[in-house]
Amino acid sequence: MSWGYRVVRYKNGGGYGLHEVYYDDAGLPWGMTEKPTGFACDKDEGPTGIEEQLLMAIDDARNEEVFDEPEKWPGKSPHMD
C-alpha cells in the first residue's frame, strides 16, 4: 500500500481539495481521506514535521495530475480480503 497527496476534483462539482489518496499493491486508488488535508504532527516531530509534510504536499500537488474523485474505487483496500 502507498499514498500521496493529490489535488482532488470532487465528483459533486463542489470544487477541489488536497487529500491523501491511498493505492493498493497494484497501484490502483482505493480511497482517500474524508476531509481535505490538515497539517499537524506529533509532539516529538515538532515544527519540522509540519514543514516536511507541507513540502511533500507541494511537490505532489505540482507533479501529479488532478485526481477525479471516482464514483467507484477501482483498487482494493488492504482491510479487505
Image (tube, rainbow, N blue to C red):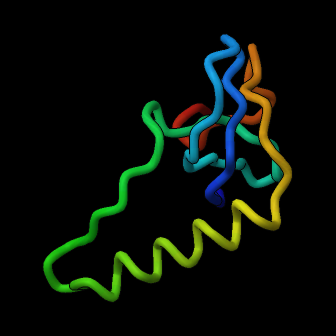
Give the farthest residue toward the front: 15
Residue at point 75%, 17% (across, down): 72
| Residue 45: image location, x then y, percent | 25, 84
What quarter of the picture does the N terminus occupy?
Answer: bottom right
| Vertical comparison of 64 with 77: above or below | below
Q: Is residue 81 above or below residue 5?
A: above
Residue drawn at x 47%, y 40% as measured from the top left = 36
Percent x, y of residue 16 = 64, 34
On-image quarter of the C terminus: top right
Left/right of residue 41 with respect to residue 28 in the rendered view: left
Frontmost residue, 76 versus 46:
46
Q: Which residue is depicted at the point 58% across and 66% down? A: 57
**Residue found at the very far left of the displayed protein:** 43
Q: Nearer the viewer, residue 26 or 50?
A: 50
Tell whether 45 sits left or right of 4. left
Q: Position of residue 76 (x, y in %)?
A: 70, 35
Q: Is 11 in front, or is 42?
A: 11
Q: Quadrant of residue 17?
A: top right
Where residue 31 sits: x, y (%)?
61, 35
Relative to 2, is 48 above or below?
Answer: below
